[in-house]
Image (tube, coloured by chain):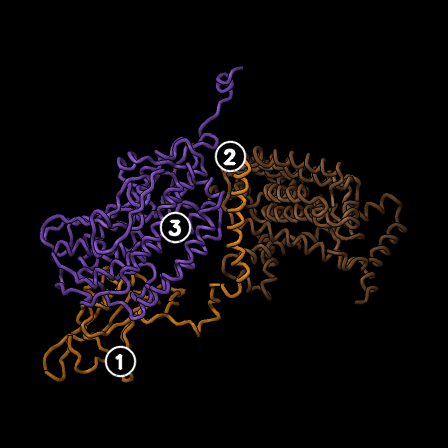
Amino acid sequence: MNFLIMNIPLNIVSTVHDWIYSIMPETAASITVMVLIAVAYLALFAVAGLYLVLLERKVAAWFQLRLGPNRVGPLGLFQTIADALKLVSKELTSNDRIDKFLYNLAPYFVIVSTLIGISVFPFSKQFQAFDINIGLFFLIAVSSIGVIGILVGGWASNNKFALIGAMRSGLQTISYELSVGLSILTMVLLTGTLQLSEIVEVQRTGGWLILQGHIPAIIAFCIFMIAGTAETNRAPFDLVEAESELGAGFHTEYSGMKFAYFFLAEFINMFIIASIAVVLFFGGWLSPFGITDGITWFPEVLWFLIKVLVIIFLMMWFRWTFPRLRVDQLLTLEWKYLLPLNLANLMIMAIIIWMNWTI
Amino acid sequence: MTDQEIKNKIKTEEYFVNMGPQHPAAHGVLRLLLTIDGEIIKNVEPDLGYIHRSIEKMCERDSYQQIVHLTDRMDYLSSNINNEAVCLAVEKALEIEVSDRVKVIRTIVSELTRIASHCLWWGVMGMDLGALTTYFYAFRDRELINDIFEETCGARLTMNYNAPGGLMYDIHPNFVKRTKDFIKHFKTKIPEYDRLLTGNVIFQKRTKGVGILTKEDAISYGVSGPVARGSGFASDVRKHHPYSAYDRVDFKEVLLTEGDTFARYQVRIMELWESISIIEQLIDNIPEGSVKEPTKAVIKLPKGEYYQRVEAARGELGVYINSTGAKNPYRVKFRSPGFSNLSVLNHIAKGSKIADLVATMASFDFVIPDIDR
Amino acid sequence: MSYFSDIYNGIKTLITGMKVTGGYFIHARKGSLTQQYPDNRETLKMFDRFRGEVVMPHDENNQHRCTGCQSCEIACPNGSIEIIWDRAVDPETGKKKKKIDKHIYHLSMCTMCGLCIEACPTDAIVWAQNYENSVYDRSYLTKTLNQPGSTVIAGVED
């Protein structure tokens, strides 16, 4: 493989960057660069979200003894384009008794918070849009904003079912954010920094964090996966959109492009949770045993994507196997089981680090 | 402020929610008017009649051979058993004794229908509770039974295989072999069902202690079938009033005493094992004989009232025929199992949550065309 | 202590469930049950006794076996069969006999119960195995079973 070919995109990016800085004053240039990066990410992740939907449908079909979509395009790869066209061209129906401003505003809360969350991830050493020194903290904070969108959407729909669904989702998300935060905190004890690129650097020298932290890290990973699936309202915690109980939950009254925002936001949220898991536990864009270290950006992005896809497959496996939990059982699980375990785990990790028993 | 003062200050209102006729979990077109307070249900009122097709009235116009095909469409998942009920009632009235071959084949076909119905019930129960893959695994097994029936009588859902006096055609030569292959395949699948759903901790937490029906309530409301047997009420018609070949096979009547949703679930899974053992006892030696006793072309029942009860997959199905000696019946009434089972729903759903109502309804196994006829 | 054993047992049952679906995922290609329907029309064959549609087979001289006795019309529960007959002089015996003019079959009302085929004394009508009966215009579903210009096979009595 000619490694110089892979440097070409990097060269293009840096030349464009320099050119913009040369023709405009400082602030205008930085704003233009940020807008360009935002548009690139938007385009990229819209397409990625759609292909995640196709992956979910294919994986679901393979669990259920059938083949997924395979008519539109080879292996059904153009199915999502057909779906996107359908969603864009649908009529936007609504009642005349909805709260118009809030009804139109709700999807934007959800999609904007997820896209902001995407921007801090390190896909490779060179590819990180927003490398701030409080990366993880920022990420958790931004992903909590999505709850507002769900609550507002359910309220503004003027529909009893939507309201019930939105209320359930609100209390679910708020409860499980605690568990997510605490399990991330357990790993931050090992790394000593909140900056995402630094976390990956720590794993380059010492090995993946899940191996460094052995027992408490494995427990933290299990709790993180459970709480992460609950954060994104996926099965087995999807009583928000429980199809067999209440119609469609909080997005009953949405159709067309607004529904597409909710739908895409769920899948991109799943991507975010998987990415946090990969960065914190499984070494980010590092290759196992350092096989392809040192070769520019392409294998690193590839490793990152492969690891994220494995975690996403695990989340899909959960969805298609387990029945869903009832509301009070959900809260029991969080407050009586996950939270005490998490606190105990945190103390165990602190003791292990203090006594230098990490690997 | 004390607790009571707080409750008085914050007023909550009950509101009506319609779990409407078009609903993914209502097993058909059933409208339930729920009065709920937050998440707790205060009252459930079923509203029936969305699929009433006046089957009993149509039976008054048709002759006795023609009313058999209408019963297929009542409880379409146990269509063979419904046909058998009407044919047995007519044969009882005419005092025809069918041959042993017919009795044994009718029993085997009824048990296969029961297995098919319970398979679909299992798939739908998983689906209602959120495990969406169980539906497909159940249908894979149901397809094999449908193939057996399609080869023998030509239809997959509305079989119309029984006729007054016997069966419409003889079984296909491949019937025995296909049934044996199916039994062998299915015996490996039921443990798989157990591993996927029964042992699952989420499923058990969702169904244990939910929707408890006591034995006294079961007897006083007249429930029958696996619902009653899950509460300890021994009501299996095959054991207590045997018909066809049930008096010569050896099977247990499954009884559990807890009366909650998990007990009803387990009763049906154990009934699957019992049905398999009944078929195994009968399939190897089907006696020779005639397949249809000759009856007159125009059947006229003697004047009087005749009743026959059978054990459908959902409970006790009763057929009442009142004849005045003409060639059409004067009145036909079907005692449908689902109707009595539905009447108990309000009693046990009070005070539970909506999610519990869905689980309870899934364990009752309603088929609304059976209730509405 | 039951707290921890609860958690352990719970996780064990969850993993057992996941193994079942995981097993199906791995063997997905060969275990897949679905058939690609429009592509496999040539190889898809129904069973012999499959109840598709009622037809009247004609042999190569355009002759059928229906004598117009109306047994099927009487046996049908909801009037999906209408027989139009008239009387003609039978060439062999010289007497007036019933003769079939049109055997009208309403596929839209037929419930596929099979009573007409059982009632026919000469085996004139049989089940066909076609399952693609959808049309754009409902009047195409009212079919005349005997083809124009066909006659009864000689010697068939009801």
Q: Which mark is residue B366?
A: none
- Chain identifier of the purple chain: B
**Amino acid type, residue under disc 3 in the picture:** Trp
The answer to whether marks 1 and 3 sit on the same chain is no
Q: CA distance from mark 2 to mark 1?
A: 76 Å
Q: Colour of chain C?
A: orange
Which quadrant would residue B258 be assigned to in this image?
A: top left
Question: Is the C-beta separation of discs 1 and 3 under 8 Å?
Answer: no
Chain letter of mark 2 equals: A
**Residue pointed to by mark 2:** A328
Residue depicted at x 10% and y 83%: C93
* Quarter of the image with the N terminus of chain B in it: top right
- Chain identifier of the brown chain: A
Secondary structure at numbered mark 2 = helix
Instruction: Evaluate whether residue A101 shows in this view.
Output: no
Which quadrant would residue B204 be assigned to in this image?
A: top left
Residue C70 percent coordinates (x, y): 18, 69
Q: Which mark is residue C149?
A: 1
**Amino acid type, residue under disc 2 in the picture:** Asp
Secondary structure at numbered mark 3 = helix
**Residue pointed to by mark 3:** B121
Chain letter of mark 1 equals: C
Residue B337 percent coordinates (x, y): 28, 45
Return the residue nearer the eye: A318 or A91: A318
Chain letter of mark 3 equals: B
Secondary structure at numbered mark 1 = loop
Residue depicted at x 77% and y 53%: A124
Left/right of residue B191 with respect to residue A4 in the rendered view: left
